[in-house]
Image (cartoon, rainbow, N blue to C red):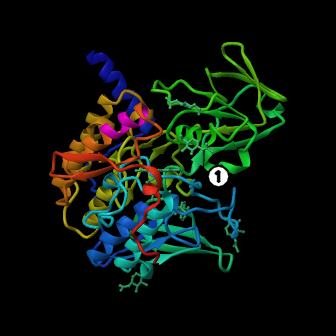
């Protein structure tokens, strides 16, 4: 056992190339008069912008698109937008949130109380816009600015961005960099034998915009994660046939008789797909709902981090680049509610504003190893999952920020289970938080309730 641990430590140290020499302190953070650069103005970038502003920190958030909102902004373009910038959002028509809004709200900025618990995508977008307006964030947000590189320059970061308005590149010095570019931006498609010979259309759920184009067609859906299940509901009764390859265990709702469940894929041929059980289905279109990977193409080795699509390490509290603590991340964390991003944002703004100090490098590394031991594989290194409530407590204790109550974790856990038991109807309920540990939930009649949105467009 102990030999195993020693071995694992050695391997981790090797693969991280961590050489902590002496006590030279990389942690003396810049003065308060510093300048902070935020990458991205989706939920996470907006959350940190609000707190930075409240702390009086000088900052700019650089956003590649013409508008803020990230994932919650619908963009009709596929691939690149009208400015040639990659479309980072994966929003599609008729999307409704799959987690109660109470687990997604910014601190002290709730939705109007009459909002359905599961509002639709456009409503969540309006909510984000109303947040921007309320905290007057546009003065600190620079849109149409695609960050292309962030490199360490000895005592600050050089950040380069491509401005689509004038097609020029600009390099600016930043004392702090907050990386909030989203975790659902780089779609992953597994390799399958024969995929290149398939003659039908192929897309990833990242590029899926609406169900209508699939009307009357034979469609193969691969995967049953959040997007996979959502698309199944959207497509099962309008397609000529919906072939769904997945191995999720859940209560199958009453899909149309044109729905067929299949095991894993063996390979593709020109007109269809062969499954591991030897069966064959002729299909016109394939939609891969096979997930995303971390994507930070603007970083290089000067960040001091070890990265892949599956992990970023070592990060203290899943936030701080231990090697260069003036670089922080929001959203490099799995199996959490969106409110975690808000808490990470509050933590980062407190850190930059000098409200608390980080522990020593050695202590941060110890904490990280402690976490690493409990998460056996590199792929699991950025997972919070079952430790979410403790995570909220830790962030709050260290940074002196609001502690999100255990009830949010209860709601998350119930919702995750209920979604798999009642896929068609789990959103037809409204929730109300009663106190830090309890909430109530009642049937709201379904129907058009989910389309109600009491927020004015801003
Ligand atoms: C289809 C879908 C549905 C979801 N539904 C839910 C849900 O119901 N409930 C829930 O809790 N979570 C949901 N999520 C998770 C969702 O990611 C979070 O709710 C939240 O939007 C994360 O915000 P973010 O700011 O971290 O990332 P994003 O919303 O992706 O924002 C990142 C921003 O950074 C910008 N950007 C990226 N790269 C650069 C660059 N190089 N330079 C400048 N700007 C850049 C992008 O343009 C974007 O505006 C969903 C995700 C997806 C994909
Ligand atoms: C904020 O930082 C920028 C970039 O360093 C600088 O040009 C600007 O004067 C600063 N603003 C304030 C109010 O300090
Ligand atoms: C901007 O940088 C990109 C590389 O990121 C390069 O391809 C492009 O030519 C540059 N544009 C200008 C105007 O310098
Ligand atoms: C398809 O099924 C969904 C889920 O039950 C339902 O909401 C929708 O109204 C149905 N659409 C059609 C065209 O039958
Ligand atoms: C399931 O759907 C079929 C056809 O859409 C319908 O006839 C049947 O009543 C439904 N069954 C249940 C239990 O909802």
* Quadrant position of ligand 4: top right
Tell me the crowding category of disc 1: few under 14, some 14 to 19, or many 20 or more residues within 10 angstroms, Cα based: some
Of 61 and 90, nearer the camera is 90
Q: Is residue 371 left or right of residue 248?
A: left
Quarter residue 52 falls in: bottom left
Measured from the top left, where is residue 375 in percent x and y? 34, 30
Q: Is residue 262 magenta?
A: no
Residue drawn at point x = 32 percent, y = 18 percent: 4
Q: Residue furthest top?
A: 277
Measured from the top left, where is residue 190 in percent x and y? 64, 33
Instruction: Say if 364 sits above or below 200 in the image.
Output: below
Of 281 and 165, nearer the camera is 281
Which quadrant holds the N terminus? Answer: top left
Residue drawn at point x = 65 percent, y = 74 percent: 164
Measured from the top left, where is residue 135 in percent x and y? 34, 77
Principal secondary structure, stretch drawn in magenta: helix
Looking at the rendering, the stretch of residues picked out in magenta corresponds to 414-420
Of 16 and 270, nearer the camera is 270
Q: Is residue 9 left or right of residue 221?
A: left
Of 168 and 433, nearer the camera is 433
């Amino acid at each position: 056992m102990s030999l195993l641990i020693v071995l694992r430590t050695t391997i981790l140290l090797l693969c991280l190339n961590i050489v902590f020499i002496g006590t030279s302190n990389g942690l003396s953070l810049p003065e308060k008069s510093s300048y902070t650069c935020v990458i991205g103005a989706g939920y996470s970038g907006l959350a940190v912008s609000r707190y930075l502003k409240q702390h009086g920190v000088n900052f700019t958030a650089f956003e590649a698109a013409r508008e803020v909102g990230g994932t919650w902004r619908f963009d009709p373009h596929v691939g690149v937008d009208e400015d040639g910038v990659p479309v980072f959002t994966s929003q599609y028509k008729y999307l409704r949130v799959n987690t109660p809004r109470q687990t997604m709200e910014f601190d002290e900025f709730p939705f109007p109380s009459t909002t359905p618990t599961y509002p639709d995508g456009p409503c969540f977008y309006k909510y984000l816009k109303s947040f921007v307006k309320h905290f007057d964030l546009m003065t600190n947000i620079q849109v149409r600015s695609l960050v292309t590189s962030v490199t360490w320059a000895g005592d600050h970061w050089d950040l380069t961005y491509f401005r689509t308005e004038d097609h020029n590149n600009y390099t600016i010095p930043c004392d702090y960099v907050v990386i909030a570019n989203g975790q659902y931006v780089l779609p992953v498609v597994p390799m399958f034998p024969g995929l290149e010979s398939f003659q039908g259309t192929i897309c990833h759920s990242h590029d899926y915009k609406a169900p209508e184009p699939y009307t009357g067609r034979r469609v193969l859906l691969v995967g049953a994660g959040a997007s996979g299940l959502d698309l199944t509901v959207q497509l099962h009764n309008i397609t000529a046939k919906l072939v769904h390859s997945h191995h999720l265990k859940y209560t199958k709702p009453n899909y149309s008789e044109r729905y067929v469940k299949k095991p894993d894929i063996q390979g593709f041929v020109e007109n269809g797909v062969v499954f591991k059980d030897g069966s064959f289905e002729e299909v016109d279109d394939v939609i891969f709902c096979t997930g995303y990977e971390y994507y930070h193409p603007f970083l290089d080795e000067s960040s001091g981090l070890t990265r892949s699509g599956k992990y970023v390490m070592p990060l203290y509290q899943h936030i701080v680049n231990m090697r260069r603590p003036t670089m922080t991340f929001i959203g490099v964390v799995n199996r959490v509610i969106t409110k975690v991003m808000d808490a990470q944002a509050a933590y980062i703004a407190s850190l930059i504003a000098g409200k608390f100090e980080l522990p020593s490098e050695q202590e941060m590394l110890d904490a990280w190893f402690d976490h690493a031991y409990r998460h056996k594989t590199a792929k699991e290194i950025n997972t919070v999952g079952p430790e979410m409530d403790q995570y909220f407590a830790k962030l709050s204790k260290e940074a002196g920020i609001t502690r999100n109550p255990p009830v949010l974790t209860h709601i998350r856990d119930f919702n995750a289970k209920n979604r798999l038991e009642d896929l068609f109807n789990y959103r037809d309920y409204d929730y109300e938080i009663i106190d830090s540990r309890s909430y109530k939930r009642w049937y709201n009649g379904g129907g058009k309730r989910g389309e109600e949105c009491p927020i004015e467009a801003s």
